[in-house]
Amino acid sequence: MLPTLFARAPHVDAGLHAAPGGAGGGRRTGWDAVELRRIDFLRAREAGKTDGDVSGWVKASGLAVACVGVEMGWLHAEGQERARLLGVFAESCATAKAFGCPRVMSAVGPGQGDLAASAASVREAAGIAQAIGVRLAFEFAHSAAQLNTLARMRELLARAGHPGVGLLLDTYHIVRSGGTAREVEDVAPSEITYVQFSDVPPGALRRRSTRGASRAQAQWRGEEARPVCGR
């Protein structure tokens, strides 16, 4: 099955005063779906709203839910904090399932660790997702201490070897990490759970020290543009 591609589905921003109309705005501007981040639910709670209110706003908009975000940090967490984060993880999986959304997404979060231990951590999280009926889309970040390239994330997921998890590919992080179009072409569709098509800020490669910047600029041609199909 091919991964779902959304060109950066809008967030709900559920804790803001505009939240009841936020998702509807997505429909008016031509979006097919929204992403629900963990922080959207937390902001709603801080504003005195409930998770049911958030669900109601989204369902009233008529938009599908593309992906539901979990709280990051579970990969290297231990003890009580890991138990808490995996509880939140399961809660987000159940939310996605209730929306008819087949996936949740997670960034790698802080820290780094042994590959074998990380793979075991991923297997546990993926097992939770699979048991609830969704799949985890796991995203590398160019700024992460360890899992900061597509190759490193692929290595981890291959070691984990669990069908309940796949790649979340974000074009922003691919470019900022020095990734190339050829590296993406090498990824089998079965490895991918979710794709985010995001812009790289103009001048980002010039202003910041970016891993493999010269190679990225050679592969993703254009003036401050990196076409996904570019060579």
Image (spheres, rainbow, N blue to C red):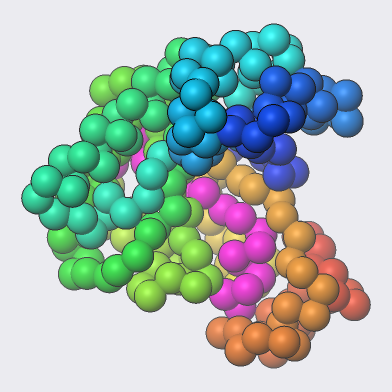
- Say whether residue 206 is magenta: no
Residue drawn at x 37%, y 50% is 72
Residue drawn at x 56%, y 41% is 194
Q: Is residue 25 left or right of residue 188?
A: right
* Closer-to-camera residue (12/192): 12
Give residue 160's position: percent from left, percent from top: 25, 51
* Closer-to-camera residue (200/126): 200
Asked where in the image residue 109 lies, by quadrant, the reply is bottom left
- Say whether residue 175 is magenta: yes
The answer to whether residue 191 is visible is no
Residue drawn at x 38%, y 44% is 71
Residue drawn at x 52%, y 71% is 142
Q: Which residues are magenta?
A: 162-178
Quadrant placement of the N terminus: top right
Identify whether 9 is placed above or below 66: below
Give residue 29's position: percent from left, percent from top: 88, 30
Identify whether 191 is placed above or below 26: below
Quadrant placement of the C terminus: bottom right
The answer to whether residue 173 is visible is yes
Q: Is residue 113 left or right of residue 224?
A: left
* Closer-to-camera residue (129/84): 84
Q: Is residue 12 left or right of residue 132?
A: right
Asked where in the image residue 164 lies, by quadrant, the reply is top left
Give residue 166's position: percent from left, percent from top: 43, 44
Q: Is residue 213 left or right of residue 120?
A: right
* Closer-to-camera residue (136/203): 203
Identify whether 65 is placed above or below 81: above
**Number of numbered labels in the structure image:** 0
